[in-house]
Amino acid sequence: MSQEQVYTEAGFGQSVPRGTRPAIVVVDFSYGFTDTQYPTAANMSAEMAATRRLTDKARAMGLPVIYTTIAFHPSEREALPWLKKSTGMAALMVGSRLVEIDAATGITASDPVLVKHGASGFFGTNLAALLTGAGTDTVIVTGATTSGCVRATVVDAVQAGFNVLVPRDCCADRAQAPHEANLYDMQQKYADVTDADDIAAWLDSLG
């Protein structure tokens, strides 16, 4: 039995319903991840450009565009288990350029930026409240990294009761294998993995 047959027979990979009030969550497109002068970063310019196409459109429609960034206080360097496992992340210090959202994303002063200390955009933040308060029914998740904070945010979005869409060309990772593996798994279990063209057309259809 093929891999696809295994998942299909188990009832995975169904299509996600699309509502009428979407929001875009842009995960961790901060300089620490996008500016290759930093060891934690990779070249994410194409993914940021694809994301900006969607965020510009959503913002013009009055839809929420919410950014997240990871930022630690110095006291957390030795205290947090995550920073013992992923020591490079300890460079993402509050007040440093690494935690600022990359201007290439097209972020505006009116866009919320949620500071997180874990992988998911929902963990320890008011993201769920912001989405619920805006009447959001469908969350479009973009950003970095696909196998880390994007995936964690997607899983928590589903668990928080939102339908989730993931445009693959708006998500970036440091290596192709984990990027593809996690897109596949999200498609099977948590979200519809699509692309920016599809999302843009859907947004246009909402008027």
Image: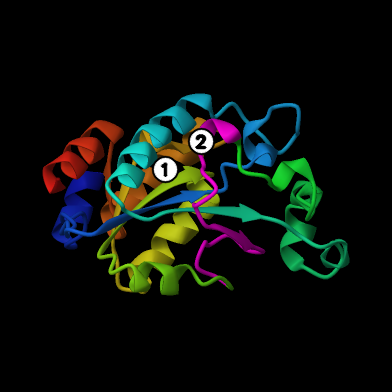
Is residue 197 visible from the viewing direction of this image? yes
Q: Residues within 10 Å of mark 2 (few under 14, many from 20)?
A: many
* Dominant SS in magenta: loop
Mark 2 or 1: in front is 2
Left or right of 7 on screen, residue 49:
right
Q: Secondary structure at mark 2?
A: helix
Q: Which mark is residue 78?
A: none
Residue at the spot of label 1: 181
What amino acid does circle 1 point to?
A: Ala
Residue 142 position (above or below residue 197): below
Percent coordinates x, y for residue 130 in the rendering? 43, 69
Residue at the spot of label 2: 105
Magenta region: 103-123
Left or right of 63 on screen, residue 83:
right
Query: Is the Cβ of the residue at disc 2 closer than 8 Å to that at disc 1?
Result: no
Residue 149 position (above or below residue 75): above
Question: In terms of image quadrants, where is residue 205?
Answer: top left
Q: Residue at x 81, y 63 (%)?
A: 73
